[in-house]
Image: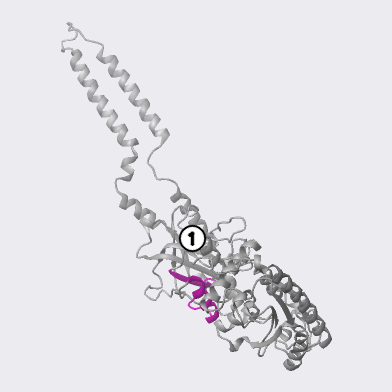
Amino acid sequence: MNKYSPAFHRHKSLKQEKNIMLPFSCYSPKLSLYILATCVILLMLLQIRSLHTVLPTSSSPLPSLSPSASWSLFQQWQNLVLNRTLAATSPVNCTKNPDSMNQKLRDSITFLPLKDLRFSSQPLDGHTWFMSSMYDTREEGEVQYQQFPSEPSKGRLLCLKGRDTHDGSWNYYALAWPEALPTNATLMKGLTFVSYNHYNYDNIWHGLSAVMPFVAWHRKNSCEKPTRWVLYHWGELRFKMGTWLNLLMEATFGQAPYIEEFNDVDDDQPVCFEKAVVMRHNEGGMSRERRMEVYDLMRCKARAYCNVSLDRRDSHKRPDIGMTLLMRSGARSFRNETAVIGVFEKECKKVKGCRLMVAYSNNLTFCQQVKQMSLTDILISPHGAQLTNMFLMDRNSSVMEFYPKGWLKLAGVGQYVYHWIASWSGMRHRGEWRDPNGESCPYSDEDHRCMSFYKNGLIGYNETHFAEWARNVLNDVQTKRFEEEGTKNGTASMKTCDCN
């Protein structure tokens, strides 16, 4: 095996780690048995010798040993044998120099690449190509995570090395005992959140998917707050979150997230963390009930942060039924916005207490988006990251989604992410409309190259379909609203958030 290959280093690391986990001892059962047998034989011979007194004879002119002299000789041999036996078998000798032992532990630490290129063809499968030698802690219905130090880590801390922003295989990780950290390592105090994101932290959907599991861990662990965040994309360091995500985390944790940049650390200098939690599977492993509880917490914290009422009945400005058209500009926007607005406005006017609101997500601040969603019962919007805001609506609110031509066959499973978040956050996804018309592709309809033509296409409209769809959703929401009004006196209001 090539000693420069990742496989060689992984084999070497696992072998060393196995040796380290065994308690160090000079004790050998076989050696002890040999020494003990030798002692017994010597003691027997000396005892026999001490029982004989040799009388002087003509053939033996030398004086004989007296019993007392023989007993003294026996004691000397006994002490000599016992002392050497204890010296050979006692584990105390092995730990006389703890500094030497710590140095051996320190020398045994092996740093492995954060991004394991052996799994580049399946980076998200199993335990992923990020920190590939580590396994997550799994509890039924809970988020998958790694924590250091912990029982699975044998009490060892997580250490990182490298600041590369272009190739994750040049950034490294290792585990080390607190008393034997790597040479020249810096120990960072407090709790560190280490996040792996296969996409990016600027897009609000992909960013939220990466940080949401940390909120779940925070909620489950006595609302403990992080001292810092370390962000990775494919093992490459990232030094910022998007503004929307940054403010959501500030609202949730009650403090602006500090993104560690390791400015005071050399590129080849290790950094170890007093306590670290690693996430690399997004919401993987979480039950729907647990996800809804986490989204409830973030919704509640965001509204409190933006001074928006936590209870819809406390808002005098809220319409009976709020219908929001959340528009996009550019890619996947409506080709004829005026016509689309007209269809939904007409249907909204037919329902008492309904109010249509039109907003553009790129023109709203974070808190304006939070407030807009708090007034919304029916969210109407093209497929896109702005739909992530849906979890900021009250539970059981409705979502209507629109796609350009070509997405159904070519976009893959990712086109359903807003179906998923609707379910996870307690919303009701009311289906989608897919435009049958649009830009033509020079290849066959099932050729994946066509996705580059369809991905950012504009969306048309079908007045008849839109009107009937809106009418059905409005009628259902109105019916449920009447049912809520009939039971509101017995319904508890949400006045405080978890983790206050």
User: Which residue shows up at 74% across the image and 85% down it?
Assistant: 454
User: Which residue shows up at 73% across the image and 79% down it?
Assistant: 400
Question: Where 13 falls versus 319 (above or below)?
Answer: above
Can residue 246 be found in the magenta stretch?
yes
What colour scheme has been applied to the protein in the rendered image?
A: one colour
| Amino acid residing under circle 1 | Ser
Side (left or right) of 20 relative to 139: left
Can residue 122 be found in the magenta stretch?
no
Q: Mark 1 points at which residue?
A: 222
Q: What percent of the width, then of the height, locates residue 165?
A: 49, 77
User: Which residue shows up at 18% across the image and 12% down it?
Assistant: 64
Question: How busy is the neighbourhood of tag 1: few (under 14 within 10 Å), some, or many (20 plus)?
Answer: few
> Regarding mark 1 in the picture, which secondary structure is present there?
loop
Q: In which quarter of the image is the N terminus?
A: bottom right
Count all numbered tags in the image, as a single digit: 1
Q: Is residue 5 visible?
A: no
Q: Which of 19 and 231 is in front in this view?
A: 231
Quarter of the rendering containing residue 444: bottom right
Q: What percent of the width, then of the height, locates residue 376?
A: 66, 80
Q: Which of 351 and 434 is in front in this view?
A: 351
Q: Can residue 142 be seen in this view?
A: yes
User: Which residue shows up at 75% across the image and 76% down it?
Assistant: 478
Quarter of the rendering containing residue 78: top left
Q: What percent of the width, then of the height, locates residue 221?
A: 50, 60
Q: What percent of the width, then of the height, locates residue 488?
A: 66, 69
Question: Where 453 falls versus 59 (above or below)?
Answer: below
| Extent of the magenta region | 227-253
Q: Nearer the viewer, residue 167 or 302?
A: 302
